[in-house]
Amino acid sequence: MVAQQQLRERIKQAERIVIKVGTSTLTYDNGRINLTNMDHLCRSVSNLMNKGKQVILVSSGAIGVGVGRLRLPEKPASIRHKQAVAAVGQCELMKTYSRLMSDYTYTVGQVLLTKDDIDDQQTRANIVNTFEALLEMEIVPIVNENDTVSTREIYHNGTFGDNDTLSAIVAVLVEADLLIMLTDIDGLYDSDPRINKDAVFVSYVPEITDEIESSAGSEGSKRGTGGMRSKILAARIATVAGLDAIIANGSAPNVIDDIADGKSIGTMFAGLRD
């Protein structure tokens, strides 16, 4: 077992980092972009890169941002309308990332994936090569599931179901050192704090057990698809592959900087290493 202080030091030394940010962090309830959170995110990513670290950003929000851009009252119900809204939202999302990151002198590149892309051996190898080339050129890959062709309802195309799973798979593919999942809650509790006011915060998980998984609940927010359970499952994918993982509140100021400085932020999961 890795002691908490040892894990914090290991996280501090991480060189290749995958950061997943959810719709609830990127947008307000009406779907409009939360520029404060996005600017904090881009500034922190740029700061990590200034330190010589490599960062891949897995970003949700295409449908949510599309809803805000089109001034829709709510997320559409039909598949084809969701895909259309995602197409609009993805453009808006990338435009915002590009503008904000350029303020900190960095360039972004879009990578849209489906599960079929990962399952195919040759395509998977090409994806890894693209990631490596982008990172070598100090370009920040912005990764999202290709919502215009892949949704939960279209099983034959293959779908990750949520970007938590996608972020873990990407982290394993590129052999990252650390996976950070940013959400709208401080981390893992022993029960849902929205229901149980006496829920106890869990700051450190040396190994993800079935009991830990069952305490995570299920559903996410109305704007996103992944709840705490999907993040625990993603953390399990990462830690089994030897990566350390953290779940933390994406709206907390300087959350990424604090994690990178080895502070006790969020819930830490130790990667299973020899």
Image (spheres, grey):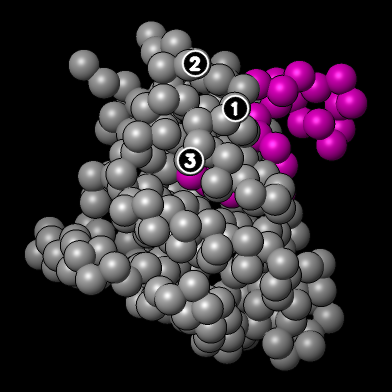
Query: What's the CA distance linking mark 1 and mark 2?
Result: 9 Å
Tell me what residue is drawn at x 41 percent, y 17 percent.
Answer: 6
As drawn, the label of residue 260 is: 3
Tell me what residue is drawn at x 89 percent, y 26 percent.
Answer: 197
Q: Residues within 10 Å of mark 2 (few under 14, many from 20)?
A: some
Q: Residues within 10 Å of mark 1 (few under 14, many from 20)?
A: some
Three-letter amino acid code at the position of disc 1: Ser
Residue 239 vertical placement versus 59 (above, below): above
Q: Which residue is mark 2?
A: 4
Q: Is residue 175 magenta?
A: no
User: What quarter of the picture does the C terminus occupy?
Assistant: top left
Query: What's the CA distance linking mark 3 and mark 1?
Result: 10 Å
Query: What's the CA distance linking mark 2 and mark 3?
Result: 15 Å
Tell me what residue is drawn at x 65 percent, y 30 percent.
Answer: 188
- Which of disc 3 and disc 2 is earlier in sequence? 2
**Percent x, y of residue 74:** 79, 76
Q: Which residues are magenta?
A: 180-202
As drawn, the label of residue 264 is: 1
Q: Nearer the viewer, residue 100 or 251?
A: 100
Three-letter amino acid code at the position of disc 3: Ala
Can the viewer see residue 86 in this picture? no
